[in-house]
Amino acid sequence: MNCQEYTEASSCFEKSHAYKHLIIAYAKQGAYSQALDLADEKGFYEIGAKIASRIQDFRQAAYFYSFFEPNHAAKLYRDLACYYEAGYCYLTQYDALNAIDMFRRCRDKIKRSRGLKEVSDYALVLYLKKEYMTAFRIFIALDDFYSALECAKKLKEEKLITSCKMLIGYQEASKQRYHFAAQCFESFAPHKALCFYAKAGDYDAQVKLLLEHGDYEKAIQVCMIHQNLNKAYEIASVYNPELLSS
């Protein structure tokens, strides 16, 4: 090897199973494919990473780095737009938020879905381990507001519970499921709930909510708009007889 007789050196290293030196000898001869294949086969990942970097095969370098420096591998994969591989590198380091960012950039829908499912499964494991806040942050990043709500309930954080219900409400409204969206808002934003009940065409729910909040006049107006005169008269006579004369 020192005399640069790499072919003969390779033969000796192969016979003596000195694979580390054999990889170097292959690289010295310019047989990079053989060197990298052997480095992968025998687990000499650091040498493989150095050789791949030297010949500017950065995808192969990222592969080798993933075994011992996954964060560096993730950055290399990201720069190469290999977002699926980058996401998995981040996930092996329990960096779920960066993993989500990478998986969402995948153009391949199957890979994108598979990667995000892996993150979701990881968040579920955290939930089962009672690491509710960490799981909550991941579910929010995944737009899985129902699972985030369960975490918030376990944490007994009213502000987080309300935030989750609000996000679920808007999510349901975006899918034109207005009735369910309205139910999400009822307890903390009744005016928003009234709007969604109106969009859902559920005027009985509108009237019921208005009565619960003591807005009798508006409840009567809703009944009048929809020509339910009997209901309007009933509300006026029960809750505010003075309205009968107006």
Image (spheres, rainbow, N blue to C red):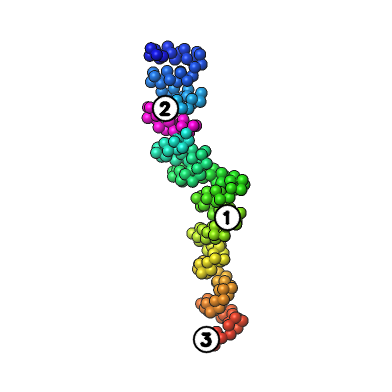
Say which residue appears at 42% left-offset and 18% top-offset. Answer: 25
Per the rendering, the mark at residue 177 is none
Q: Give the quarter of the figure containing the N terminus.
A: top left
| Residue 132, visible in the rendered structure | yes
How much space separates mark 3 and mark 1, taking CA atoms? 48 Å
Q: Earlier in the sequence, mark 1 or mark 2?
A: 2
How much space separates mark 2 and mark 3, taking CA atoms? 88 Å
- The prevailing secondary structure element of the residues shown in magenta is helix
| Residue 110, visible in the rendered structure | no
Q: Nearer the viewer, mark 3 or mark 1?
A: 1
Q: Earlier in the sequence, mark 2 or mark 3?
A: 2
| Other residues around mark 1 within 10 Å, as few (<14) / some (14–19) / many (≥20) | many
Give the labeled residue for mark 3. 246
| Other residues around mark 3 within 10 Å, as few (<14) / some (14–19) / many (≥20) | few
In-front residue for pair 46/109:
46
Say which residue appears at 56% left-offset and 46% top-offset. Answer: 123
Residue type beneath disc 2: Lys
**Disc 2, SS:** helix
Residue 27: give x, y in percent of width and height: 41, 21
Pointer 3 with pointer 1, Cβ within 8 A: no
Q: Which residues are magenta?
A: 48-68
Give the labeled residue for mark 2. 50
Q: Earlier in the sequence, mark 3 or mark 1?
A: 1
167 with respect to 128 (left or right)? left
**Disc 1, SS:** helix
Residue type beneath disc 1: Ala
Give the labeled residue for mark 1. 152
